[in-house]
Image (cartoon, grey):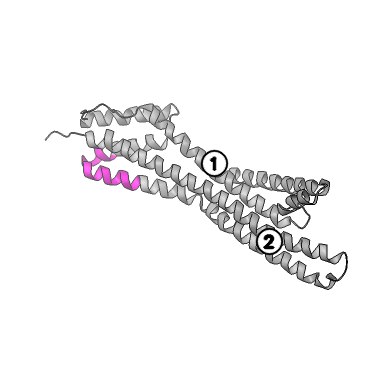
């Protein structure tokens, strides 16, 4: 399922990048003023802007991947609306009531209301039933939440790679077009040679600028996702501790 979704994102990214590239080329060719033409060329509006197209593809793919997981985390907040645990002040829970909470959660999951929160609550109730220890229940809950968070962070390793890869692609484009401009130096004294050399130099530095700019935007999306991740797991842990673990009363 994940592989199919990722392939879908790759296909969208490829098509979108090629479309953006050709729109920029068309815009540059139809521009009447030099300023507007230079604007389109700066963003890859020339057939020499193939590195720009690769950068656009990497950027779009990275954004789609991050948004997919960000949508998943936002979906998980709906679990709090199920009122899985009591929130009344001064309320205590007996072991039997903890078992009843688990049964209610299982019933909700059978009816399609399955979230990370329901799973954590169910596991906490199971752990307490197994050893009747509040301390061990808290330790196991903390470990499960940490493992779940680490797993979701690890799934975006490709986004971390793309943030660095985009910057590297910009430098690669700069080197390629600088090499191309050096190869045209023998035409420097000709009337048509200088515009070609200037265009190569412009494109070479434009690729680095665009790559760094898009890399910053992708980095912003990535860190927003991490913020949402931290917020969700912090809220989850507080919710279960405050309304389940800290309420359990085991009579001697």
Residue 242 horizontal side relative to residue 156, left or right: left
Q: Is residue 142 visible?
A: yes
Q: In the rendered view of the protein, which quadrant contains the C terminus?
A: top left
Magenta run includes residue 140: yes
- Helix, strand or loop at mark 2: helix
Q: In the rendered view of the protein, which quadrant contains the N terminus?
A: top right
Residue that badge 1 annotates: 68
Q: To which quarter of the image does residue 168 belong?
A: bottom right
Residue nearest the observer in this picture, 248 or 192: 192
The residue located at (44%, 49%) in the rendering is: 151
Structural crowding at the residue carrying mark 1, measured as other residues with C-alpha within 10 Å and reported as few (<14), some (14–19) or many (≥20): some
Residue 247 vertical placement versus 30 (above, below): above
Query: Of discs 2 and 1, which sits in the foreground?
Result: 2
Q: CA distance from mark 2 to mark 1?
A: 32 Å
Residue 215 horizontal side relative to residue 154, left or right: right
Magenta run includes residue 23: no
């Amino acid at each position: 399922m994940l592989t199919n979704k990722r392939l879908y994102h790759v296909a969208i990214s490829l098509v979108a990048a090629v479309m953006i590239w050709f729109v920029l080329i068309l815009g540059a060719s139809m521009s009447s003023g030099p300023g507007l033409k230079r604007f389109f060329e700066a963003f890859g509006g020339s057939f020499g802007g193939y590195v720009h197209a690769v950068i656009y593809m990497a950027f779009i793919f990275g954004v789609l991947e991050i948004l997919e997981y960000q949508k998943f985390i936002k979906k998980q907040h709906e679990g709090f609306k199920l009122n899985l645990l009591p929130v009344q002040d001064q309320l205590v829970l007996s072991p039997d009531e903890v078992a009843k909470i688990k049964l209610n959660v299982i019933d909700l999951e059978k009816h399609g209301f399955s979230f990370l929160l329901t799973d954590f609550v169910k596991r906490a109730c199971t752990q307490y039933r197994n050893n009747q220890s509040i301390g061990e229940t808290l330790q196991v809950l903390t470990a499960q939440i940490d493992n779940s968070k680490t797993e979701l962070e690890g799934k975006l390793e490709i986004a971390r790679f793309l943030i660095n890869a985009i910057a590297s692609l910009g430098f690669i484009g700069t080197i390629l077009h600088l090499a191309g401009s050096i190869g045209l130096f023998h035409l420097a004294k000709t009337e048509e040679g200088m515009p070609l050399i200037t265009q190569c130099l412009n494109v070479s530095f434009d690729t680095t600028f665009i790559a760094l700019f898009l890399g910053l935007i992708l980095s912003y999306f990535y860190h927003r996702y991490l913020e949402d991740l931290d917020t969700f797991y912090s809220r989850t842990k507080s919710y279960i501790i405050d309304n389940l673990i800290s309420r359990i009363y085991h009579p001697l």
